[in-house]
Image (tube, rainbow, N blue to C red):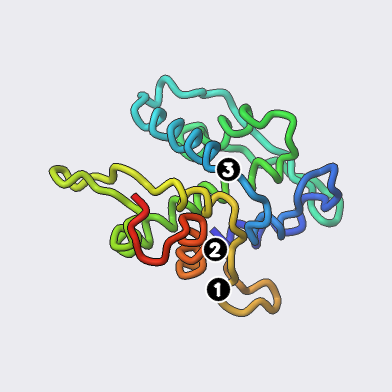
Amino acid sequence: MSRFFNRLRGQWPESPEQGPDMEAVRRGMVPWSAEEFWAVFNHEAELRGTPQDDWDRRPSTVTLTESDGTTREVRFNPDLLLSQVMRWLGDRYEGLPWTQIVSHMYRYLEIKGFVQEHQARLEEAGLLARDPDSDELMGIATDLVEVLATVPFEAEGPEEAGAASWTFDYDRVLERVRERAGTDEEPLF
């Protein structure tokens, strides 16, 4: 995901009227909300259960402004689930700057990636619940989603020349979740 943002860096104006700059997006400096995460999560689940023939098949494009002032058009593939989610976010947040919409999509993907990458540790910490019969994920602790929706990302790797990859730091997230829950040890489910 960081390569995607390294390619896009500098392609949107940085003025406040235009929304956050891509560096703020890449560093997770644009907070979101747990309610909005769940709205996107539920929409994605609904799409997964919908035949692709019933998806919104209209062409979708975005015009990017390069740092030198030139523009280019990027087309989204309507056959890709994430393109459908991004279109839905664009409709949901109509009127917001494009970079803010991108920041919410990026954070959504980072949250899902974090939960997947740290699944065993999160279960051990009592932040994920599984159905004992099917072993399917049943739930994510509210405090975990609240923290992931708002906490800035941390740098992984060297920051010089934009080489750092920005994402959630497991230990920092767990610390913030426990602060919210007011506990050091107890499971939060």
Element class at badge 3: loop
Are the two marked residues, 2 and 1, in contact with CB atoms closer than 8 angstroms? yes
- Identify which residue is drawn at 46% across, 61% down: 178
For badge 3, the amino acid type reads Ser
Q: Residues within 10 Å of mark 1 (few under 14, many from 20)?
A: few
User: In the image as oriented, which residue stretches furthest toward the left?
Assistant: 133
Are the two marked residues, 2 and 3, in contact with CB atoms closer than 8 angstroms? no
Element class at badge 1: strand
Marks 2 and 3, the one that precedes in the sequence? 3
- Identify which residue is drawn at 30% across, 58% down: 123
Are the two marked residues, 1 and 3, in contact with CB atoms closer than 8 angstroms? no
- x and y percent of residue 4 in the render? 59, 57
Q: Which residue is mark 3?
A: 33
Note whether 15 is above or below 35 in the view shown: below
For badge 1, the amino acid type reads Glu
Disc sitting over residue 98 in the figure: none
Q: Which residue is mark 2?
A: 167
Give the camera-side residue of 80 and 104: 104
- Cα separation between marks 2 and 3: 17 Å
Q: Quadrant of residue 86?
A: top right
